Image (cartoon, rainbow, N blue to C red):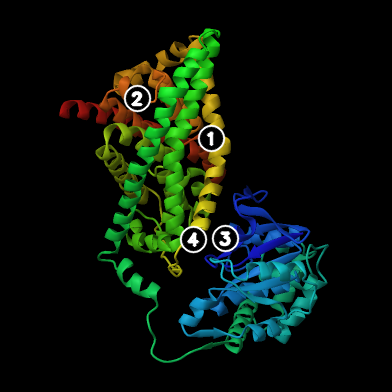
């Protein structure tokens, strides 16, 4: 049995999903798109249920990739039941999507979330009346605590087809719908629904029409409704408004500010709100620096004092090449467990807290006016925040931006100047761990300055301007530890299952190259750049090359050079800083380059990649020389 979760953004779908599936969930792209779907399994009695968390959307249309994926999944995959999760504090707005779901004729249950918050705002909802008007089961839930979630699942499992509410449009519009139904080929959903979508100019449904010319004639025959798509939308909004008024009551009287509104008076204040954001991120970086460093020391100590010495002694009788392969494979493991996991894992914990509290949308709001200075929309901060986690989904998420210009500028800044979690591991695990706080702050300051400078340059070069920001700020909420840990694990799972094996394999390959004395063949041609310009040990070209595959491999290979996690034993402070800066700025990993090609084309991807390599090498050489003069 398949159950799909549908609803607007920030209505609690992820919490609902996590309560049902736990950590046993997978993330996969919907075929032919870069939009991610969460899938998991739940068991009810003897029934195993597949739960699909659809992208949060305000409607089912073709305006955005998220809308398309949610719509196409419901139509083509045909889930047995849909659970429509509703934000009670914005019932009328949420009902628009509900009415579209009703048109699909898929059995579904409505789950009313944030019911208590609505009551605090003076909004009371008559659940029984809503159930009667819509013709569907309606359950009150609390997605954070889990209240009502299993009741919703129980209703969904036992749900049988019922007589649902059907919107009747203006008589002229209804006649057009009937005429369009006669023009349709074989269709994946009901004729009425398809005809309505055709009327709304949904490009995904126009292909089902036999005669496009006849369709245009039918549309033009309606004298009093020149814009039929707008007419359908207005009718739905009107019906949503009527249902909301009938089923809810707003208590009048003196309006009191909610706790969220009180907090927003401080945080979204343009005078000191930005300083709160800066302090929050400094707190996050301090958390990463101290706790990540603590775990790095502990894990490295186990490897350096126990595992590696024992392994070295145990493999003494092995062939020298085999010994090199084994030792470097273990060093690769050490790099993943000692450096990458602590910093990346702790970062995702912090990011999940910021998301679940509702703080991140406020960051978007506050930063909007500053983003406009480099020709970007405030919403660009969302891909950039994703980019702090991973550049790959961040590049694809630029689709949420309104223009190709904004998407391209954001992608360029993501590629070189927004450190992803793997780059964060380099900044904290190498520069920060061996040099201290100043190195972390300086690398971030350089990256931010480059982002501003190149953002301004691109803003001047590329035609057009930034669009205005309109967004909803969700309520502040206390995050649940269980949800934070689940989200952290789902984000870390790919790293654990994919990147750590790559680190082990990468270390083994590096050991094989050393054992076969092939390092010099790779290193010598690039020595003028690495040693002559960057003033680094010539062998460090190997970690930089490996970083093209996966940035985390840079750390493993750097440790492999000296066969120790203590990099300071064979590199000076200036060299550690220069190496870290170059590794952070130059071209993102191959997967991210692949996404650049997919989103913008070969030419743009090539230019972006070459530019970041040139900037990193040029800047690294300048910084190395300035550092030598200062010290």
Q: Sequence-wise, which precedes: disc 3 or disc 2?
A: 3
Left or right of 579 in this view: 217: right
Residue 14 shows which numbered tag? 3
Query: Looking at the image, can residue 617 be seen?
Result: yes
Separation of residues labelled 1 and 3 (CA atoms): 25 Å
The answer to whether the residues at label 2 and label 1 have Cβ atoms under 8 Å apart is no
- Going from N to C along the chain, the mark reached first, 2 or 1, is 1
Q: Which residue is mark 1?
A: 499
Image depth: mark 4 or mark 2 in front: 4
Residue 382: percent from the left, percent from the top? 45, 55
Look at the numbered disc 4 and give the secondary structure of its residue. Answer: loop
Q: Residues within 10 Å of mark 2 (few under 14, many from 20)?
A: some
Quadrant in which the C terminus is drawn: top left
Q: Which residue is mark 4?
A: 480
Q: Which mark is residue 567?
A: 2
- Of discs 3 and 4, which sits in the foreground? 4
Q: Marks 4/2: CA distance?
A: 39 Å
């Amino acid at each position: 049995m398949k159950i799909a979760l549908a609803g607007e953004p920030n209505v609690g779908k992820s919490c609902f999903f996590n309560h049902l599936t736990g950590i046993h969930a997978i993330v996969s792209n919907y075929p032919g798109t870069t939009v991610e779907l969460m899938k998991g399994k739940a068991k009810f009695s003897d029934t195993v249920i597949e739960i699909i968390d659809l992208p949060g959307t305000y409607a089912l249309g073709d305006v955005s990739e998220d809308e398309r994926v949610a719509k196409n999944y419901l139509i083509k995959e045909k889930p047995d039941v849909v659970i429509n999760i509703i934000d009670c504090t914005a019932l009328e707005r949420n009902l628009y999507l509900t009415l579209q779901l009703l048109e699909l004729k898929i059995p579904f249950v409505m789950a009313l979330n944030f019911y208590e918050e609505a009551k605090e705002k003076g909004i009371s909802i008559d659940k029984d009346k809503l159930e009667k008007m819509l013709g569907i089961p309606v359950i009150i839930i609390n997605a954070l605590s889990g209240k009502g979630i299993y009741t919703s699942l129980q209703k969904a499992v036992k749900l049988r087809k019922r007589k649902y509410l059907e919107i009747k449009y203006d008589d002229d519009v209804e006649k057009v719908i009937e005429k369009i139904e006669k023009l349709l080929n074989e269709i994946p959903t009901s004729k009425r629904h398809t005809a309505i979508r055709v009327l709304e100019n949904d490009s995904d449904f126009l292909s089902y029409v036999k005669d496009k010319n006849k369709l245009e004639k039918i549309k033009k025959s309606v004298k009093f409704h020149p814009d039929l798509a707008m007419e359908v939308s207005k009718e739905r909004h009107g019906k949503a408004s009527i249902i909301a008024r009938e089923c809810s009551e707003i208590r009048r009287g003196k309006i009191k500010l909610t706790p969220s509104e009180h907090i927003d008076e401080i945080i979204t204040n343009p005078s000191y709100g930005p300083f709160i954001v800066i302090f929050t991120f400094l707190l996050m970086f301090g958390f990463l620096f101290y706790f990540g460093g603590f775990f790095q020391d502990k894990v490295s100590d186990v490897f350096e004092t126990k595992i590696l010495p024992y392994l070295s002694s145990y493999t003494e009788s092995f062939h020298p090449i085999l010994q090199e392969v084994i030792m470097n494979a273990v060093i690769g493991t050490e790099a993943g467990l000692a450096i990458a996991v602590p910093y990346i894992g702790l970062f995702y914990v912090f990011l999940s807290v910021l998301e679940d509290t509702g703080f991140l949308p406020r960051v978007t709001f506050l930063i909007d006016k500053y983003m406009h200075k480099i020709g970007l929309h405030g919403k660009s901060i969302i891909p950039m925040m994703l980019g702090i986690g991973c550049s790959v989904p961040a590049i694809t998420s630029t689709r949420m931006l309104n223009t190709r210009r904004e998407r391209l500028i954001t992608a360029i800044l993501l590629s070189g100047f927004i450190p992803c979690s793997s780059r964060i591991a380099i900044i904290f695990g190498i520069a920060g761990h061996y040099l201290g706080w100043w190195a972390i702050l300086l690398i971030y300051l350089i990256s931010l300055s480059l982002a501003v400078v190149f953002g301004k340059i691109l803003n001047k070069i590329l035609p057009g301007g930034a669009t205005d920001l309109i967004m909803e700020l969700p309520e502040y909420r206390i995050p649940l530890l269980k949800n934070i840990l689940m989200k952290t694990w789902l984000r870390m799972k790919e790293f654990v299952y994919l990147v750590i094996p790559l680190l082990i394999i990468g270390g083994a390959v590096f050991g094989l190259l050393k054992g076969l004395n092939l390092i010099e063949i790779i290193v010598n041609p690039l020595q003028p750049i690495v040693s002559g310009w960057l003033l680094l040990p010539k062998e460090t070209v190997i970690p930089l090359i490996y970083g093209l595959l996966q940035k985390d491999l840079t750390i493993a290979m750097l440790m492999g050079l000296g066969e120790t996690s203590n990099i300071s034993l064979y590199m000076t402070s200036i060299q550690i800083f220069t190496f870290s800066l170059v590794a952070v700025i130059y071209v993102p990993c191959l997967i991210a380059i692949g996404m650049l090609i997919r989103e913008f084309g070969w030419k743009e991807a090539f230019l972006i990649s070459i530019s970041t390599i040139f900037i990193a090498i040029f800047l690294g050489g300048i910084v190395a020389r300035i550092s030598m003069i200062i010290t």
